[in-house]
Amino acid sequence: MPILLPGIRDLIEDRADKDIMDVLTEASPQDIAEVFDSLSAPEMMYVFNLLPFELAIDVFEQLDEEKENQILEVIDRKKKIAILNRMASDERADLFEKLDEKHKKYYLSIMEKEEAEDVKELLSYPPDTAGGLMTTDYVAIYEWMNIGDAAKEIRETAKDVDFVYDIYVLNRHERPIGFITMRDLIMHKPEEPIGKIMKGGVVKTQIDCNQERVAALFSKYDVATMPVVDKKGVIKGVITVDDVIDVIEEEDTEDMYHFGAAGNPPDSYFSAGIFGTAKRRMSWLLILVFAGFLSSLVIERYSSTLQAMLILAAFIPVLMDSGGNAGTQAAAVVIRGIAVGDIDFKDIWRVVGREFLVGALVGVGLGSLTALRAILMGEGGLIGFIVGLTMIISVAVATTLGGFLPLIFKKLKWDPALMSGPFVTTIVDVTSLGIYFEIARRMLTLIR
Amino acid sequence: MPILLPGIRDLIEDRADKDIMDVLTEASPQDIAEVFDSLSAPEMMYVFNLLPFELAIDVFEQLDEEKENQILEVIDRKKKIAILNRMASDERADLFEKLDEKHKKYYLSIMEKEEAEDVKELLSYPPDTAGGLMTTDYVAIYEWMNIGDAAKEIRETAKDVDFVYDIYVLNRHERPIGFITMRDLIMHKPEEPIGKIMKGGVVKTQIDCNQERVAALFSKYDVATMPVVDKKGVIKGVITVDDVIDVIEEEDTEDMYHFGAAGNPPDSYFSAGIFGTAKRRMSWLLILVFAGFLSSLVIERYSSTLQAMLILAAFIPVLMDSGGNAGTQAAAVVIRGIAVGDIDFKDIWRVVGREFLVGALVGVGLGSLTALRAILMGEGGLIGFIVGLTMIISVAVATTLGGFLPLIFKKLKWDPALMSGPFVTTIVDVTSLGIYFEIARRMLTLIR
């Protein structure tokens, strides 16, 4: 629960406007937005109308799109226009993304023409690309300016720009060719030329670049902002690091959900309905159940072998689990390696080789232990041999598949994490059981 | 492979110093560091000695600690001292962390006294806390200054500070009470007082705050830097967003490894040796194998039931897999919910309730399907009933445990992700098999 909440509630009831303002002007927009989440709609509107305009915009931008809509519906036309014109362009595009056609048209019609064009342009880029992440509010200067010109430009345009730190220097084709920092502005004399001071080597991203790749660039180059360019190298916008952090968290949530075979993530754990959640999870489990039926077929096929040696059934769980678990380990490690950029498709044979070796080593360890257990429990050397050998082969197969399949998924441009733990487990189970009973059947034929 | 590499190799061979410099001064320190990773030690030293001092420091900071050591060993004393004194304080602390006592002592003895003290202080904080993440290179000004004083202070101290955007305003107790932005410096006249311009509500973190919590604060408040304070509220350092991105990636890698029961992550996928990897993974699998032996005991215990109805064996895999998979789904979702802050321990009963309901719904679906499969394959209604009922109960138990256990782990201050997919699967397997055979035994007793 937000700390501010209980106090605010009482103050709203008392209509103690001045006290409310005293509390809120000390708080960050994020904290105020969090308070809004717990207020009723009338309470929220009451507080929102009290906020000074600048703070109101900052708070508005922190709300989810549903609340933003709610507020836009009820505030007066003048305030509506002001908010729509003034809010950060990336947040605004996210809001428009969720609007119905009627509202979209209406809001675009009352906005300033330039701002409306901006919305339409940003909406034209897929949300999970650099174009969908970028803001068009940024400061750029030209190589022929001097420090004094640049300072003037920034004084005029930087008012609503977040994270002004690196300021990109453009040439006459609007291509970013360097940057200066805010620090340079106060370190140098007004008459010094930008072209002399600027640093080259701007790290840029293409407008259609996938958001995962954008995040990797931020992570590698330790930057707070990055310019987005089109095919001709012309600057179209800037991505800020706060949005990149959201992307990283979103991608990692997706990976974890996929790896757990839990479908695509909802907005948050509690926001999803029970039936929707059950349906989403069931769709994956159904596929896995059908795959599981294959294991049943294997056992049915070998029922005479099982009849002859009922004790084989007792080792089914430990063989299935170990194969599945070893495969899950390998898949988890390789999927994460792909996500952080350690592993690429070209490494596939190196990965497969490593995973096979690791699996063989681990398999020998687990196989010896399981064989020993069988012998110590009085099941005899034959059972020990069958169980131990199966364990070695199935663990090695499991780790090899766990390493191989995510890379194949990547090559097919699917999410490698879709090569989930449960999926690997289920595939490996069929394989383990087949190996197990086939070895057992041959042994039985041999000794008879 | 880094793009620059092939060209550079040739240039080094030709001793074409000017051409090497032309290539490198256009590249970012990160790209040059990447090239170093692929060069031999003599090649690396050759290039390093060509770099202008400022660039050399930037590149040095991007290298891993092993390469940093290698370079420090061979460069001359003067350069050694300069690098040690000048490099970013957080990077330097990371380097010292990995040094042996002899080198640590020697380097501290040749550094400036103030810088040596700084290293000792930073080394005193655990690496996974705010104190371990922060840098002591930051710009701070005092509330009684005016804009002109602040600009002067920044001109003098900001030279080696990264991400100077928010500048913290301290009171006479050295406590951060507000901030101004670089933009304010050029928007206001030199004589304007800082106290009038600064914004309040600085988002701070305590020096012993866990790094996961620090990352959550950055993510919520959309800041590029955050001051670190001690118990008295006195500023001790600043954390920058680039290090926070590394923390988020590190924590998410750890979660994925733990969830896949693959132990603690190495530095990168390929950096770990085959034997080390096998050993690390085996330790978890051994625990799971012993747990799997419990499943064997269950089957052995019910061998007369199995003997009487051999077909029961055919459904062991699908029951085990479905229970394990449903439990893995629930655990993945809840572990991620905990990681991003959607779920807290106080929500435990709400989570358990949700997961039970979802499990019951999913179980009814999968149970009906499996029962139907049994009946259609001619196994009869009794087997269908036993298999279907077991599926419903074991899926509901699995999702409930998958939701419950990670939260218990969190309460015990263990990593919730240690409640891994394989671990849930193995626990659920024993339970499913017990339920399965017990239902079967009772049914057999009834019909006899």
Image: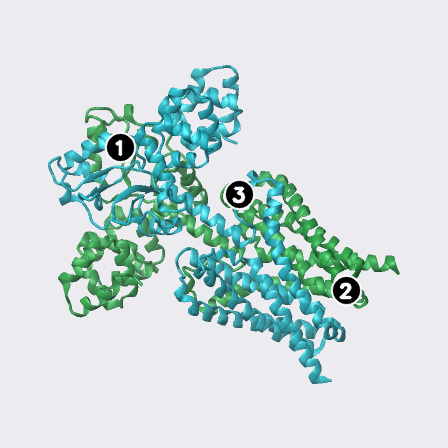
Chain colours: A cyan, B green
Q: Secondary structure at mark 3?
A: loop
Q: Mark 3 = which residue? A: A266
Residue projecting furthest to the right: B448
Circle 3 Cα neighbour tier, 10 Å, few/some/many (<14 / 14–19 / ≥20): some
- Which quarter of the picture shows residue A95? top left
Q: Nearer the viewer, mark 2 or mark 1?
A: 1
Q: Nearer the viewer, residue A41 or B9?
A: A41
Would you name the residue on which mark 1 appears?
A158
What secondary structure is marked by label 1?
helix
The amino acid type of the residue labelled 1 equals Ala
Is the same chain shared between marks 2 and 1?
A: no
Mark 1 and mark 3 in contact? Answer it, CB < 8 Å: no
Residue A131, position as x, y percentages in the image: 35, 44
Specify the amino acid type for callout 3.
Pro
Disc 2 crowd rating (10 Å Cα; few below 14, some 14-19, many 20+) is some
Mark 3 and mark 2: Cα distance apart in space: 43 Å
- Residue B204, can we see it? no
Q: B155 or B327, which lies in front? A: B327
Residue located farthest toward the left when viewing the structure as drawn:
A191
The residue drawn where x is 58% and y is 62% is A425
Q: For numbered disc 2, what is the local secondary structure?
A: helix
Image mark 2: chain:
B
- Residue type indicated by callout 2: Arg
Q: Is residue A389 above or below residue A410?
A: below
